[in-house]
Image (spheres, rainbow, N blue to C red):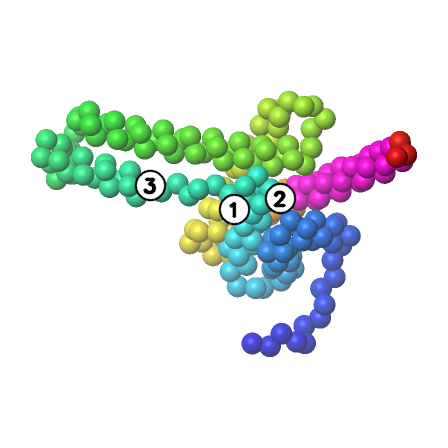
Amino acid sequence: MSTTGSPAPRYTPEQLAVRNWLRGIAPSLEEAYVSFLALASHDGFPGRARLIAHCLREIGNGLVNRIVGYQARLEYTAQLDGLSDTWSDPAGPGDGAIPLSTEVTIPRPVAERISALLRMHTARRGENVDRVQKLFASFQLSRSANVQELYPVARAWHELLHFFHGRAHNQETDAERFDKEFQQKVSEFERSLLTFAKATDFFEGIKEIDDILAEANRPAS
């Protein structure tokens, strides 16, 4: 595959700021962002909406993992195996077929396993929003020390990542995917990255000034 002959892309100052910021966190995140920019500028590239969604989802998840820390993958297989075993138990509902009636009665052990599975799923969803909230707190996006004030924004950003996850894995064509909602979500994600980059640079600059002042005011030994 040839890697020569393509004109060098031109980036806006805002895009360069985001690139530099992402590079400082992880080069792989910068690569994903550059890929996104290339795809966004090529209207005729086949499947670009799906690929853009993949890039933005990877950037979002990567920021959380790199800054907040990696989270152990939640494995549903063991839980589902246990539910399947309970369902297939001779004392259970039999062959798993659902009776043709308006109501279905299931044994308590089956209901308990379903309830446990749902609680685990709900708890993990809450943990994911909490992790985004910690990410935002690290950017010092709020003047208040109360991190809970960031929760509504963190939840909205988590839902944004979930949106891109869905668009990355559905079977629609570009003509179906690249609708007004998709374009609005992409723009929203771009604005958030620039906000994060600017906030980080600002507070790093403040820290450098604080360090200089502290050094200047340190008593001579």
Q: Position of residue 51 (x, y in %)?
A: 53, 57
Asked whether disc 2 touches disc 3, contact meaning CB atoms under 8 Å apart, the reply is no
Q: Residues within 10 Å of mark 2 (few under 14, many from 20)?
A: some
Q: Which residue occupies the foreground of this view, 87 or 74?
A: 74
| CA distance for labels 2 and 3 | 30 Å
Visible in this render: residue 49?
A: no
Q: Amino acid at mark 1?
A: Phe
What mark, if any, has residue 189 been given in the picture? 2
Q: Which mark is residue 76?
A: 3
Residue occupying the far left of the picture: 90
What range of the chain is rendered magenta? 192-218
In the rendered view, does 11 fall on the left or right side of 60?
right
Q: Secondary structure at mark 1?
A: helix
Instruction: Point out the frontmost of discs 2 and 3.
Output: 3
Specify the amino acid type for callout 2: Phe
Circle 3/circle 1 CB separation < 8 Å: no
Q: Is residue 119 above or below residue 212?
A: above
